[in-house]
Image: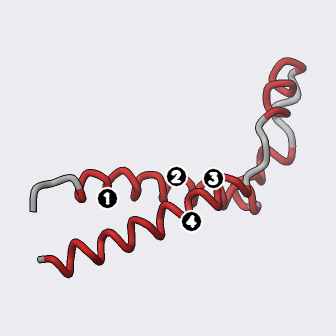
């Protein structure tokens, strides 16, 4: 049981490091608000954003954040 907990802790630390790196690689969201105020929200970029690098980073952030929360709960269970 000690090996499993150690393995989960190592995976947890790796997820933390990768999540921090991915969040820092993302672009700012400042342009989204100005586009919403001017009515320019339905652009070509917004339609293909999911297939771009930024879309991939957002998807990876969601997956890693969910993994972070789940592993946090698992590591705080009494073994």
Q: Mark 3 points at which residue?
A: 58
Mark toward the start of the polypeptide (4 vs 1): 4
Residue toward you, 69 or 55: 69
Q: Residue at image x 26%, y 51%?
A: 73
- Judging from the image, what secondary structure is the residue with disc 4 in? helix
Mark toward the start of the polypeptide (2 vs 4): 4
- Judging from the image, what secondary structure is the residue with disc 2 in? helix
Q: Where is residue 21 in the image (x, y as percent from the top left)?
A: 64, 61
Q: Name the residue under label 1.
A: 71
Mark toward the start of the polypeptide (3 vs 4): 4
Residue toward you, 28 or 2: 2
Q: Name the front one of labels 3 and 4.
A: 4
Mark 3 vs 2: CB contact within 8 A: yes
Q: Position of residue 27 (x, y in %)?
A: 78, 48
Residue that protrudes farthest toward the top in the picture: 37
Mark 2 vs 1: CB contact within 8 A: no
Mark toward the start of the polypeptide (2 vs 1): 2
Q: Residue at image x 49%, y 60%?
A: 16
Q: How crowded is mark 4: few (under 14 residues within 10 Å), some or many (20 or more)?
A: some
Residue toward you, 63 or 49: 63
Between the C-alphas of marks 2 and 4, the distance is: 12 Å
- Judging from the image, what secondary structure is the residue with disc 1 in? helix
Q: Mark 4 points at which residue?
A: 18
Q: Where is residue 66 in the image (x, y as percent from the top left)?
A: 41, 52
Tally of numbered tags: 4
């Amino acid at each position: 049981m000690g090996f499993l907990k150690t393995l989960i802790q190592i995976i947890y630390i790796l997820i933390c490091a990768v999540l921090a790196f991915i969040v820092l690689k993302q672009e700012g969201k400042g342009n989204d608000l100005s586009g919403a105020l001017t009515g320019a929200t339905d652009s070509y970029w917004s339609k293909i954003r999911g297939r771009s690098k930024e879309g991939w980073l957002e998807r990876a952030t969601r997956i890693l954040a969910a993994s972070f929360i789940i592993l946090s709960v698992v590591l705080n269970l009494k073994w």
